[in-house]
Image: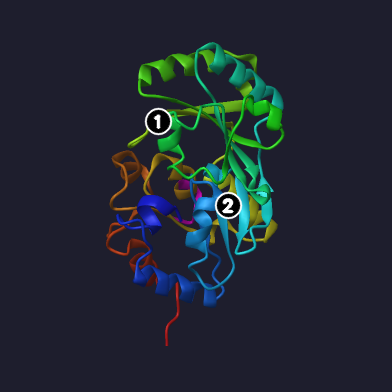
Amino acid sequence: MDLDGTLLNSRGCISSLNHYVLNAALAQGIRLIIATGRRFSSTLPFALEFHGDLFVVSNNGQVLRASPTGVRVAETYLSPNAVAAVLDSGKKSGFDPILHVDHYEEGVDILAESPITDPKFHNYSGGDLKRSRVVKNCLDYGSDRILVACFLSQQKDHLVELERNLLSLPESAEFRTVITRIHGVAYCLEVLEKNVSKWSAIDTFLRANGLDSAGVVAFGDEKNDWEMISHAGFGFAMKNAIPHLRDHAPYITRYTNDEDAIAMTLLELGALCFP
């Protein structure tokens, strides 16, 4: 299940009913996976609200970790060659890079060459610099565990031009790009491993545990949820999902994220047993 706009309501909380039903699911041996574009450290507090072991797919499928232990189960990183080429091209175009890195155990999630006084970086980090490092050169920190490379701009067309440059690189066969609008921050160009998605991480989990996709119930509301919704046995777009997802999803919930959609749908499916 996705986090923002899906498991979380518009106040950024997990509702009491979702808590109750999902904790009951865990108690009955049903596996729960939170699949999000967020980094693991900002997702873990929500995972810890549940009483039991569950799993977190973070950074849109780049890393799969267990909760509450934080143990890494699977990971996919950008290649060092691709990262070097992307950063070089971005800098030549006048952009300061931001890297999401898999150094959770060392307390580092983000590397940036922007000064902490840069409003874009400050807003992007949410003002929380505890797990961020501002460095002179991102690659000095190492290039072996990089999840996502990001570039920010208030002008989308500037990122479109940069994206065109990146996709002309020989290394572009190894990555894909996505431009999104981060409300209150800027437009963001993300560079990710080419064949990674939330579903690819979930599929890794299923294979490792001898489970079949036919038994998976998935919920999401955004474009990055499409792969898991389309591959799950029961893939639900939220009632509040973007139109494209609602138009193409196998199923649509009858409820929004403010109406306990996950809990209500699981109850209507009869996925749980109650005395």
Which residue type does callout 1 highlight? Pro
Give neighbour class at mark 2: few <14, some 14-19, many 20+ (Cα, 10 Å): many
Q: Say above or below: 148 vs 27.
A: above
- The residue range painted magenta reads 230-234
Q: Quadrant of residue 117?
A: top left
Q: Residue at x 61, y 29 (%)?
A: 135
Front label number (1 vs 2): 1
Q: Quadrant of residue 123?
A: top left
Residue at label 1? 119
Q: Which residue is mark 2?
A: 202
> Who's the residue at 57% across and 74% down the image?
29
In-front residue for pair 155/58: 155
Residue type at the position of mark 2 = Ile
Picture colour scheme: rainbow
Asked whether 108 falls inside the magenta stretch, the response is no
Is 210 situated left or right of 165 in this image? right
